[in-house]
Each structure stands twice: as structure tokens, then as C-alpha cells.
Amino acid sequence: MKLFIDTAIVDEIREVNDMGVICGVTTNPSLIAKSGRKFEDVVKEITTIVDGPISAEVTAKDPDEMVEQAKPLAALHKNIIIKIPFNKEGLIACKKMTALGIKTNVTLIFSAAQALLAAKAGATYVSPFLGRLDDIGTDGMNLIEEIVDVFDADPAIETEIIAASVRNPIHVIQAARLGCDIATVPYKVIMQMLNHPLTVNGIAQFDKDWATVPKD
Ligand code: G3P
């Protein structure tokens, strides 16, 4: 399973990219707002950091307007993926963008039925939001499993699944075990994946013991 980072904070992207663990970035309007910067500026800067798919979301409501919003974004860099909120208009926009050769990530997926429709409309990626399902007392991981099964059962589907709304390292590992293609992971969760107290204690013990080794 590939790992993307889910953030619009370029310092976080740079740090995690330097670690060699991510190969893509997802943003959304809320994450862009949190960055406090202009949308195009952030997206353009991300393209200079990560050489992989970078999702940038359209906010128009009409399919043709979504396409018009997508064109200059897609023209910014070959790696830009246009994120489209799932609904009827979004599916129409997805079909149009696919015909234009623009890659898409259909987002705010909360059922396997929605994921299947997005795949049929030509989505390059679908983004099921597992954490937000957990938040309302539903097991979000069941959704990932269902979509993996549905896509695996249809050889015509090339759409990749991005486990989104990831809240903890367990989400990442479970998605990987289910055969999900990608997990997009917030910076905080990548840091949680990095840390283990036994590793920290182990390094401290090695340093302590090394200090007692004769050097000459
Ligand atoms: O980028 C989409 C998704 O990952 C957002 O997650 O934490 O706002 O539910 P969250």
C-alpha cells in the first residue's frame, strides 16, 4: 500500500517527503484554509516538493464550472489530480474531466455504491472517509473492505482506493491488510507511526553501553 500525506502545510510535507515514506499528497478546502495561504500558491509549492499525485479540490457546484475550475489547476503541473466531491454533478464533472485526460479523485465517499458509481464515471481515485464513519458509530474499515472487494471483483475497474480520514496508525495497518491501494495520512499520525517507546529505550540503552566500550 502506498502512503500519501493529507495536509496543506508545506513544512510537514517537506519533512515527511525527506523521510522517503510518502509518494503523494492530498489536500481539501479545509486543509487549504488551515494553511492560511492562497490555494494555487500552496499547490504549486507542493509540486516542487513531491514527485507524485497531488490532489487539489474543486469547489464549484455545476459540472461545467467544476471543469473550468479544474483546467488551470491541472495545467499547473502534470502531477495534479482534481478532487471532486461525490454527487450527481461531481460524477458528470468526473466523466468530462476523464474525457479531457484530467485525472480525478472523487471524495467524500461513504458507501461502496458511491465508490462503484465514481469508478464507472472514470475516477482515477476514490476517497472513502473511514474516520468520519467511525465518528458516527459505524465501522469505517468495513467500507474500505467492501470497496476493495467490489473493485477486485470487476477487472474493468482501474480506480485506486485512497483510505482517507485516517485518525490513527491502526487505521493505516488495517487498510494495508485489506489490500487498499493508498492511505492518505495526516502528519500527526505519521509521527505516531514513527514512535515506539521500546525503540527510544533501546537506542538510549545502546548509547549508554557504547559509552563503556574502550575506544583505543
Ligand atoms: O482529505 C480528506 C480526509 O482525509 C479528511 O479527513 O480528518 O477531516 O475527516 P478528516
Image (cartoon, grey):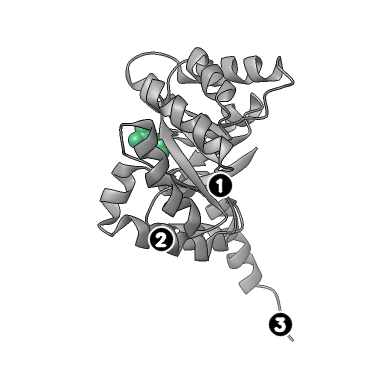
Is disc 2's CB within 8 Å of ligand 1? no
Q: Name the residue that disc number 3 marks.
A: 215
Q: Name the residue that disc number 1 marks.
A: 198
Q: Name the residue that disc number 2 marks.
A: 10
Q: Residues within 10 Å of mark 2 (few under 14, many from 20)?
A: some
Foreground mark, 1 or 3? 1
Asked whether the viewer can see residue 27, the reply is no
Note whether 5 is above or below 85 in the view shown.
below
User: Horizontal and vertical percent for residue 192?
Assistant: 47, 45
Q: Amino acid at mark 1?
A: Leu
Q: Which residue of the protein is positioned furthest toward the bottom in this rendering?
A: 216
Q: Amino acid at mark 3?
A: Lys
Foreground mark, 1 or 2? 2
Q: Secondary structure at mark 3?
A: loop
Q: Amino acid at mark 2?
A: Val
Is mark 2 in CB contact (under 8 Å) with mark 3? no
Asked whether the viewer can see residue 214, the reply is yes
Q: Tell which quarter ligand 1 is in.
A: top left
